[in-house]
Amino acid sequence: MKIFEVSLLTLIVLMVTNVSHAFQDCELTPEQESVLHFSYSYGEPHNVGYTMAAIAMQESDLGRYLINISDPSGGVWHLTVDKAVNRLGWEHTPFNYNRAIQLLVDDIHFAADIALDTVLWWHNYHEGDWFKTWSSYNGGFKGNPKYAHQIAEHIETIKQCKWVGK
C-alpha cells in the first residue's frame, strides 16, 4: 500500500509540475485553444478577458481537467459546487450537488457566467486591485497570494505567446 501511495503522490506532483510548465512552449491543442479564446472573449467586454483565460489555464489546464473532487469544484474555471447550487436556487442536497457539477462541466456558458460574476465581484470588492482579485478568486476573503502570482504568470504567457488578438 505504501508503494502505491508514493507512486500516486509522485504522479500528482508530476502532473502539477507539467501543468505549470505546459504553456511555456506556446503550444496548445485545438481544444485548449478553443477554451482559451472562449474564456478571453467572454471576459473581454468586461475588461477581464486575460483574467478569465488565465484562470482557465490555472484551474483546468484550459479544459483538460474539469472536476476537482476535493473542493468539490468543476468546469473550466473550477467553480465550487455550492456556488452553482446557490446560483440555481436549488436546495443544498447531495443529488443537487451532483446535478450542479454536471452542469458546470456540460454547460460552458453557465460556468462562464458564474466565473465572470465572481471575478467582477472580487474586482469591485478590492476596488480594482487585480492582485487581490485573483487572490480572492481562489482563496476567498483570506486570499491566496501564490495563486495570484500564478494568474499573473499565465497572463504574461498569454501575451508573450500572442494567443489572443491575432
Image (tube, grey):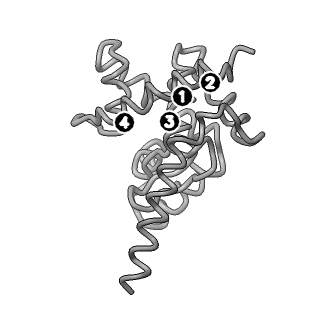
**Label 3, label 1: how far apart the Cα atoms are:** 11 Å
**Label 4, label 2: how far apart the Cα atoms are:** 19 Å
| Mark 4 and mark 3 residues within 8 Å of each other at the beta carbon | no
**Label 4, label 3: how far apart the Cα atoms are:** 19 Å
- Which residue sits at x=32%, y=32%? 136
The amino acid pointed to by label 1 is Met
Disc ID at residue 40: 2
**Label 2, label 3: how far apart the Cα atoms are:** 15 Å
**Location of residue 40 (image quadrant):** top right
Position of residue 99 in the picture relative to residue 93 (left or right): right
| Residue sitting farthest toward the left | 142
Of pointers 2 and 1, the one earlier in the residue sequence: 2
The amino acid pointed to by label 3 is Ile
Of pointers 2 and 3, the one earlier in the residue sequence: 2
Of pointers 4 and 2, the one earlier in the residue sequence: 2
The secondary structure type at the circle numbered 2 is helix
The secondary structure type at the circle numbered 3 is helix
Of pointers 4 and 3, the one earlier in the residue sequence: 3
